[in-house]
Image: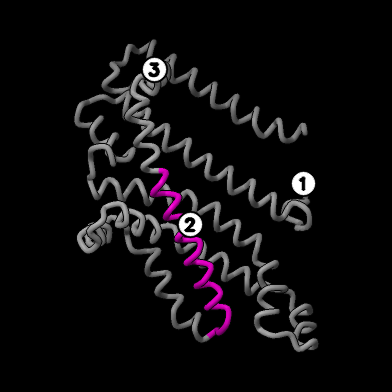
Amino acid sequence: MRRKVQRVVYPLMVGLVLLGIWQGLVTGLQLPAYLVPSPTLVMQTLVTDWSALGMALWVTLKITLLAFALATLTGVLISFLFVQSKLIETALFPYAVLLQVTPIVAVAPLIIIWVKDPTLAMVICATLVALFPIISNTTLGLRSIDPDLQSYFKLQRASRLQVLWRLRIPSALPYFFGGLRISSGLSLIGAVVAEFVAGTGGTGAGLAYQILQAGFQLNIARMFAALLLISLTGVALFVLMAWLSRLALGGWHASELSHD
């Protein structure tokens, strides 16, 4: 319990110190709000503009969650395919790497042109950003099995499905959840980048549009408020994935049982 409290209290103390320094510098140097707003002004803006920012947060979160779910499902299925044959993995894995290294900013305009529905186009863009960590981590986990256990399964004449379900998947779970932690944040990044490229406005606009609009209007406090919501969403997604990992692995895996 003490360690759990420390994990919350220590980062919170550092954050409060940084906020205090920020507030002190803005007040002491008398920096104008259109350059650097104070933390108090950012919080006031977050409250007063919550009707627009809250709706934008929901739009961005919806795209993020849809992309994350699609990336997880697609990545797991591709990993299952790779692990069935080393030849298939050797032939197709470079294309997965190609998706990872291709800048989404360069690909997003094409996807938005090809896909008529803006929301679907942004979900596809965010999915491409979040897909590779799921594929790479899950594939690595499915192949990281104990050779002795693999020999035992062969000795018992286990089928491919039995080996996959009873040996490979339990061995891959720590890697899989590690991929989820990375992919959840990348889904959010991909959603925001796709919103920037799409430039959608109106009631269906996300936080990226709020940032663009605030920049055009020199409403820097609102821009900081939108950035704060994006950051808090990313932290919440990471914490949720860490909790799911602890829930799934806490009772048996060494990565969660270790107290070092």
Image-quadrant location for residue 47? top left
| Residue 10 locus on image (x, y percent) | 64, 29
Query: Is 4 left, or right, of 16 in this rendering?
Result: right
Start-end of magenta stretch: 61-86
Residue at 23% over, 44% down:
200
Under mark 1, the amino acid is Asp
| Residue 115 locus on image (x, y percent) | 25, 61
Image-quadrant location for residue 205? top left
Task: Give the residue pinned by disc 2.
Answer: 69
> Height in image: 73 above or below 91?
above
Question: How many numbered callouts?
Answer: 3
For residue 75, which numbered disc appears in the image?
Answer: none
Task: Give the residue pinned by disc 3.
Answer: 44
Task: Give the residue pinned by disc 1.
Answer: 260
Front label number (1 vs 3): 3
Query: Is 89 left, or right, of 124 in this rendering?
Result: right
Residue 72 included in the magenta stretch of the image: yes
The N terminus sits in image quarter: top right
Earlier sequence position, callout 1 versus callout 2? 2
Decide: few, some or many residues near mark 2? Use Cα within 10 Å; few <14, some 14-19, many ≥20. some
